[in-house]
């Protein structure tokens, strides 16, 4: 297939989609501009025209990862879901995203491979982080009276869920918990947080 068979403006998105497919099917080591072009059925020069180099393609793929991560954290929530429901959905969704898209999850936080100064990536990462920011707002915990309580709550929740996701991906929890039962979900190991009234 020649590059001309894509409608104007669609080739970039097609290359990102094919790069994502390659990443998830074969891992980061298999992802290159040439392999992505071959998978998309376009000339080997096409990805370079849109992304410049591999880092540019990886950055665009990571941006898509952050958009998907935000969607996973809000999946299944009714429009008027309460704050506790949003908290649980976000934490479960974050871990589920990492488990479903492990290669993409690792790429998204790899500063050696993606450009965090890129505006598209920055916007996507900010939107994803915004979900965590929302569930941290008004959290009732032992730092709730600190002057920077919001920042502390965001850092604590992100550290908790990201650490859990990475340990789970690394297999460090094992298939069985120390009790002999299945690995406990994140909702069963995090503190039961409440929320202060607005």
Image (cartoon, helix red, strand yellow):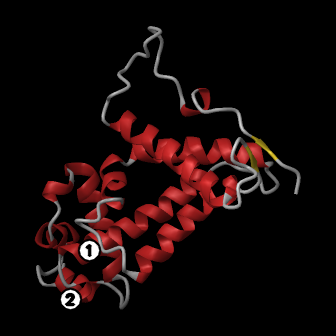
Q: Is residue 51 above or below residue 76?
A: below
Indicate which disc residue 2 carries: none
Q: Where is residue 141 in the image (x, y as percent from the top left)?
A: 72, 42
What residue does disc 2 label?
49
Q: Write the residue at 44% across / 16% down.
A: 177
Q: Residue placed farthest to the top in the image?
A: 180
From the viewer's side, name the closer residue of 21 and 194: 194
Q: In this view, does 159 lie above or below 164?
A: below
Horizontal placement of 52 versus 156: left or right?
left
Of callouts 1 and 2, which one flags the residue occurring earlier in the amino acid sequence?
A: 2
**Quadrant of residue 152 in the image?**
bottom right
Q: Write the residue at 42% across / 46% down.
A: 98
Residue 28 seen by the camera: yes
From the viewer's side, name the closer residue of 139 and 41: 139
- Does dot 2 land on a helix, a strand or a loop? helix
Q: Position of residue 145 (x, y in %)?
A: 76, 52
- Position of the C terminus by quadrant: bottom right
- Position of the N terminus by quadrant: bottom left
Q: Is residue 96 above or below residue 56?
A: above
Residue 74 seen by the camera: no
What residue does disc 1 label?
57
Q: Write the residue at 77% across / 49% down.
A: 83
**Quadrant of residue 99 in the image?**
top left
Q: Position of residue 189 (x, y in %)?
A: 57, 28
């Amino acid at each position: 297939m020649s590059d001309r068979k894509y409608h104007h403006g669609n080739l970039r998105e097609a290359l990102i989609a094919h790069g994502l497919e390659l990443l998830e099917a074969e891992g980061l080591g298999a992802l290159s501009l040439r392999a992505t072009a071959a998978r998309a059925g376009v000339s080997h020069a096409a990805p370079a025209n849109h992304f410049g180099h591999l880092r540019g393609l990886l950055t665009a793929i990571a941006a898509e990862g952050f958009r998907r991560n935000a969607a996973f954290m809000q999946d299944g929530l009714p429009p008027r879901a309460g704050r506790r429901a949003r908290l649980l959905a976000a934490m479960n969704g974050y871990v589920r995203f990492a488990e479903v898209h492990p290669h993409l999850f690792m790429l998204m936080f790899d500063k050696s491979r993606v450009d965090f100064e890129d505006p598209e990536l920055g916007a996507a990462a900010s939107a994803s982080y915004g979900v965590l920011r929302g569930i941290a707002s008004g959290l009732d915990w032992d730092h709730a009276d600190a002057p920077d309580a919001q920042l502390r709550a965001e850092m604590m929740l992100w550290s908790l869920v990201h650490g859990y996701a990475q340990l789970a991906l690394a297999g460090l929890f094992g298939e069985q918990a120390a009790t002999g039962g299945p690995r406990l979900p994140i909702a069963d190991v995090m503190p039961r947080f409440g929320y202060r009234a607005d």
